[in-house]
Image (spheres, rainbow, N blue to C red):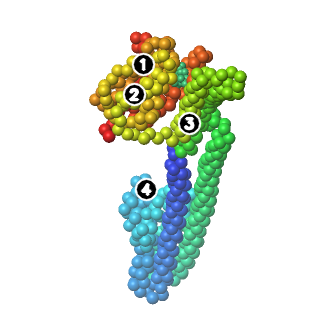
Amino acid sequence: MSKVKTFWGRISIQKKLYLIFGLMAVLIVLELLTLKYAMTNLSAVRAFVYGESVWSKAQKDSAYYLKRMAITKDIKDYEAYKKALFVPHECRIARLELNKENPDMELVRRGFINGKIHPEEVGPILHMIQTFDFLPHIQTALRTWKEADELLQTFEVRAEDYRREVFASHSDPQKRRAIAVELDRINFELGKAEDRFSHALQEGARWLENVVLISLICLVIIVEVIGFLLVFFFGNSLAEKLNQLIDSARRIGKGEFGVALPVTTEDEVGKLTAAVNTMGQKIKSSHSELEKKIAERTVELNEAIKTRDEFYSIASHELKTPVTAIQLSLQMMQKSLNDTTTELNREKLLFQINKSVELSRKLTNLQDTLMDVTRISGGMFDMKLVQQDLMDVVRHSVEEAEMSVPGRSVDLEGPEHCYTAIDPLRIGQVITNLVHNGLKYGGGTQVKVTVKDLPEWIEIAVSDQGPGISADLHEKIFDQFIRVNPDKGISGLGMGLYIARKIVEAHGGTLKLSSAERRTTFTVSLPKIAG
Ligand code: ADP
């Protein structure tokens, strides 16, 4: 049973349906074969009864010719009597042969055919006699046939006596009458035997009909019950499994990703169950991965918010410092101008004005930086490329940076000219920023700018020998708001390097930080583009 279950579980739904259909078909074929078998046997009975009627008619004819012979005393009637007995004689030969242990079937067949049985019916009759000889009806019929044969033999013996009496020159009328009376009695007995024979066969036929009918009804019931049970169990288990799958899908839909149904079969439903289980597991793992990522992103976001808040506080501080200083200078100037008692100190006034101009320039730089950041994040950071002598831009930027830190100078090394397509203002901004950083964070060491005109690139390296930047920050330093040691009192927004790298990248170049032999070097590489 368990083997059948395993086999059933392994085959596909299509094959299961074919099997159910095949089994039903086999049962129906069985039903039809039973019907055919029954019909053949019924037809054999019919043919056998017909044979009996032929036998009976022949016997009756023989009796008739015998009586006629007594009246006509014509030998032709005797011959007709003899001829009429041909059919019963042939049937007797067949019967006697059949009773033998090893009957000559050809002889039997010939006997039946000569006894006026249709050749096609001989086979079924023989089959019926041999197969159903255990049945009382068949036994009665065969016994009656034998009795009738024996009676007929007696009839024939007495008929010979009768013939002799009829054709004798001195016949005894009394003896003749006595023989005729006996012949009549035998004839009568034969009639009764014939009735018994056909009655027994008809009984047998009725029995067979009933057996066949009951068998057919049983078979139909078996077919229907088996069909119903197969469809019921198969349909039920299929519906149950599909309902479980629907339930699992619903639960997965509601967020219960760990749902796992047992895979009991290898058919389509089993495969679907395995697929749903895998899907649930995959969703579960990607869900937890997603949750992990969300947690990481939340941390990053919180850090970004913290950095942004720090930036706002630095930015407001950076704005406030020059604004306060400008206010102070203006108040001092106002005081000097209002004071009519003391002579106007022109030098002091000029110092205050210069200081205010310097501070307002710082404010403008700050505003430019903020504008650049807005442009970069808004994707509106356009470059206006023109063919330019890069050395001019570098020289001008270095001077500008030098001016912002009075008393400091920068070493510049490079070719006389080198040309490529750049946005001069933006590249100038990058160089100024890098040189300015060197002056600010280089610990007072000499800042050096080296320009190299390579075959495909132009390299501008800005270096100092200050404290440098630790290796783990070499990439991060180019992110927004990143500042190393922000508490050291040097003002800044942590945006300069971020903007610088964006500008260089917009030119198709790179900006990298390296440190070797205690030297911190920012290298700008720009592609050489012909104008
Ligand atoms: P800001 O100077 O406005 O703070 P930057 O993006 O230009 O912003 O610089 C980011 C940080 O990188 C600075 O705060 C500083 O700590 C560090 N830095 C930049 N250049 C140098 C340098 N040459 N030597 C050491 N540290 C530097």
Q: Would you name the residue on which mark 1 appears?
A: 410
- Secondary structure under tag 4 reads loop
Q: CA distance from mark 4 to mark 1?
A: 140 Å
Q: Residue at x 68, y 21 (%)?
A: 342
**Which of pointers 3 and 4 lies earlier in the amino acid sequence?**
4
Q: CA distance from mark 4 to mark 2?
A: 135 Å
460 up-or-down from 51: above or below? above
**Which of pointers 3 and 2 lies earlier in the amino acid sequence?**
3
Q: Would you name the residue on which mark 3 appears?
A: 371
Q: Residue at x 58, y 25 (%)?
A: 350
Q: CA distance from mark 1 to mark 3?
A: 29 Å
**Residue farthest to the bottom, as pictured:** 72
**Residue farthest to the left, as pictured:** 455
Q: Which numbered dot is residue 394?
A: 2
Amino acid type at circle 1 is Val
Asked if residue 266 shows in the view, the reply is no
Q: Would you name the residue on which mark 4 appears?
A: 100
Label 1: few (<14), some (14–19) or many (≥20) C-alpha neighbours in 10 Å: many
485 up-or-down from 98: above or below? above
Q: CA distance from mark 3 to mark 2?
A: 23 Å
Closer to us: 59 or 12: 12
